[in-house]
């Protein structure tokens, strides 16, 4: 019974220790964007590395400025104005029947230049787009107020070239 108080202290202490580490991981000394790097399976990771090789140097007139930590699974343009993450998990709304029926005001399915996307409005008014009907999920976040149609138009050729149509695994 003497071990219970020690376990309780360890349980309380571990989250308190992790919080500063998690917060530090989200900030950057030079002001550049920081994102969580996805952890896809081997097939999706290979497709994402291929995508990284063909991504445009400019999107919506903004130059590419990759976020930290450095990874071929992430890219950014204009610091944090546009962020791409490849190999993300399928968004829950992608299989929500309300979205397919047009009954969800915050999520809409559509296509841009041969690439299908799920558009989700975020709480802060920005948008997140995730590819559909591709062998790997590619997520693109655009800051509030950015013309997302031009972002998707600029990214569509690279997605079509590197991520084949099909079902992501």
Image (cartoon, rainbow, N blue to C red):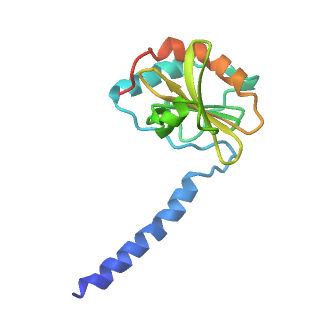
Q: Residue at x 45, y 67 (%)?
A: 15
Residue 87 visible (yes or no): yes
Which quarter of the picture shows residue 68?
A: top right
Quick check: 131 left or right of 147? left
Q: Is residue 114 left or right of residue 60?
A: left
Nearest the eye: 37 or 122? 122
Tell whether 22 sits left or right of 135.
Answer: right
Q: Is residue 25 above or below residue 36?
A: below
Q: Residue at 74%, 23% (x, y): give it.
A: 60
Judge left or right: residue 116 versus residue 12: right
Q: Quadrant of residue 74?
A: top right
Image coordinates for residue 145, horizontal then vertical, percent: 78, 36
**Residue 61 falls in image quadrant:** top right
Residue 124 percent location from the top left of the image? 70, 47
Residue 54 visible? The answer is no
Most foreground residue, 78 or 117: 117
Q: Position of residue 138 (x, y in %)?
A: 51, 28
Indicate the quadrant containing the C terminus: top left, top right, bottom left or bottom right. Answer: top left
x, y (%) of residue 93? 50, 37
- Write the residue at 66% across / 51% down: 29
Please identify the residue farthest to the left as the structure is shown.
1
Q: Residue at x 39, y 34 (%)?
A: 40
Label tally:
0
Query: Which quadrant is home to the N terminus?
Result: bottom left
């Amino acid at each position: 019974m003497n071990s219970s108080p020690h376990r309780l202290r360890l349980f309380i202490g571990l989250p308190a220790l992790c919080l500063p580490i998690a917060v530090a991981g989200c900030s950057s000394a030079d002001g550049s964007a920081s994102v969580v790097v996805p952890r896809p399976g081997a097939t999706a990771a290979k497709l994402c590395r291929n995508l990284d090789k063909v991504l445009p140097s400019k999107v919506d007139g903004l130059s590419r400025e990759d976020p930290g930590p450095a990874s071929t699974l992430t890219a950014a343009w204009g610091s944090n104005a546009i962020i791409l993450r490849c190999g993300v998990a399928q968004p829950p709304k992608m299989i929500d029947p309300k979205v397919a029926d047009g009954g969800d005001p915050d999520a809409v399915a559509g296509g841009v230049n041969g690439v299908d996307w799920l558009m989700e409005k975020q709480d802060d008014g920005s948008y997140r787009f995730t590819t559909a009907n591709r062998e790997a999920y590619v997520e693109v976040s655009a800051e509030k107020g950015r013309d997302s149609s031009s972002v998707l138009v600029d990214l569509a050729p690279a997605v079509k070239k590197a991520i084949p149509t099909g079902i992501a695994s």
